[in-house]
Image: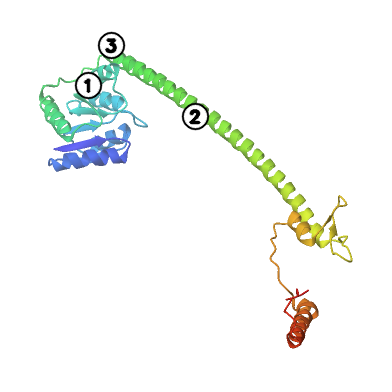
Amino acid sequence: MNILIVDDIATNRKLLRVTLEADGHSTLEAADGVEALQILARETMDAVISDILMPNMDGFRLCHEIRKSERLHVLPFIIYTATYTSPDDMKLAQAVGADKYLTKPAPAADVLDALREVMGKKAVRPVPSAPAVEETYVLQQYSQTLVHKIEEKNIELKDALGKLQRAHERIVELNSDLERRVQERTAELQTANRELSLTLSEVKVLNALLPICSYCKKIRDDKDYWHSVEIYISQHTDAQFTHGICPECNEKVVKPGLEKFLADRASRKAAGRPDDAPTIP
């Protein structure tokens, strides 16, 4: 059979086309009711499977236009929708002349069973008389359904807007909290920098002029206390000390003292005096 698929979403048309062609049917596609009527005007189709919510002309109006046509009024018509699923929607589908009402997504077997079912109704469909009263009723039902759907969409939009507003308020709250944390952290860093600067300024005192005793080499602090060099530096830095002998002191003090000690020791030994082991200065 030749089946016309009407849906404004290309992916939906593709899925339905694969299902129908796998069952041996040929297909044509239309993106809305206007395009579908143009195809039906030049092509012979055996059935129509149509979505409802589409631009330009929706599925309800398309079905109604087909049922009004003398040439197309017996064409089997299946509504396949994911948005119009209320009892009133199904009632309107019946009023405009739809043969079957399926809700997306339906299993492939359900779609094919529905197609076989509507093909059996084709021969018994009466020729449309389109009385004014019936036309008015259908249009009234159609208008009511559209108004109801718009109201539902408005409710959904308000709900979505409320969620967006709450999300925005949460983002503002998080941003405010983040700014507060940044300010607190900045203040902490500024305090740490001031403390570090103060510490560095104290350490730099070692590089300035220091009162130092000409004899014992003690250093006077800012409180007028005298300290050894080791104590003063350890109080103002993290430095630790280990003692040794520089080459100059070794030549001036240690070496002469050692030579004198060895000479005295040799002299005492030659004179037969005991070794008193004097201390090296």
Q: On the image, which quarter does residue 102 sit in?
A: top left
For numbered disc 2, what is the local secondary structure?
Answer: helix
Q: Which residue is mark 1?
A: 97
The amino acid type, in three-letter code, at marker 1 is Gly
Q: On the image, which quarter does residue 56 sit in?
A: top left
The percent coordinates of residue 175 (x first, y second) are 58, 35
The amino acid type, in three-letter code, at marker 3 is Val
The percent coordinates of residue 268 (x first, y second) are 76, 84
For numbered disc 3, what is the local secondary structure?
Answer: helix
How packed mark 3 is, by other alpha carbons closer than 10 Å (few <14, some 14-19, many 20 or more), is: few
For marks 1 and 2, give the one nearer the viewer: 2
Q: Which corner quadrant holds the N terminus?
A: top left
The amino acid type, in three-letter code, at marker 2 is Leu
Residue in the picture at 76% in, 55% down: 236
Q: Which residue is mark 3?
A: 133
For the residue pair 257 and 72, the one nearer the viewer reads as 257
For numbered disc 1, what is the local secondary structure?
Answer: loop
Q: Which corner quadrant holds the C terminus?
A: bottom right
Query: Which residue is outermost to the front?
Result: 272
Above or below residue 84? Residue 32 is below
